[in-house]
Image (cartoon, rainbow, N blue to C red):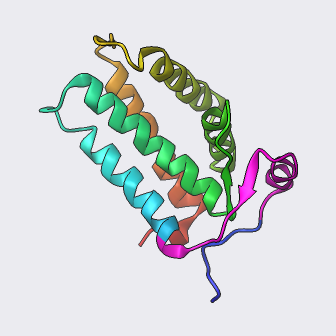
Amino acid sequence: MTTTLLQRPTTQLELLQWSRQLQKVRFDEVAALRFLSNALVSLRDAKTPELSTIGRYLMAHEGIYALCLGTVYLHGLLPREQEGSRAMAIQLAFELLDMTIQDLHQMLSANRHLEDIAGLPHAILSEHAVPELVALGDRALGQARLVYPDCFF
């Protein structure tokens, strides 16, 4: 089956595959679109004011991360489950999407914060954390529309 969504891996992605940080996976268009759907739904749900602040923060983060995984997956690859793979997927996707360095730093900071608060009974977030992360997710989706227009109908 031929597909219009599968992209050729960049040299950087091939190097990360060779170094066993990324693994080649069987590409499926439905799975690729599912990553995008998960990102869209999570970012939409993160805008629901009736949900708790931490719940909305987690949804926004997971939406952006789903978009990051989907971006790497469009090249027929996914990160291996190992220390630092989540941050690596974020960095790779933000580079592939031509996001700004400031956006990358914001997302990596959000990822570190998420790791810091995981398992805490009472996580503390600033009142601006959720809207800022949702706005970052919206920018990332906008870039994905520009870079990978065939994924959006």
Residue at 17%, 32% (x, y): give it. 51
Q: Where does residue 112 sit, x and y in percent of width and height?
A: 54, 20
Quadrant for the N terminus in the image: bottom right
Residue 70 x %, y %: 55, 56
Q: In this rendering, does residue 138 appear at all?
A: no
| Residue at position x 62%, y 59% in the image | 73
Residue furthest to the left: 50
User: How many numbered discs, if any?
Assistant: 0
* Residue 8 can be seen, yes or no: yes
Residue 124 vertical placement versus 55 (above, below): above
At x 25%, y 44%, the residue is 45
Residue 118 in which image quadrant: top left
User: Quadrant location of residue 147?
Assistant: bottom right
Q: Magenta span has 12?
A: yes
Q: Nearer the viewer, residue 13 or 135?
A: 13
Residue depicted at 54% across the width and 51% down the height: 143
| Residue 128 is one of the magenta-drawn residues | no
Q: What's drawn in magenta, residue-wise?
A: 9-30
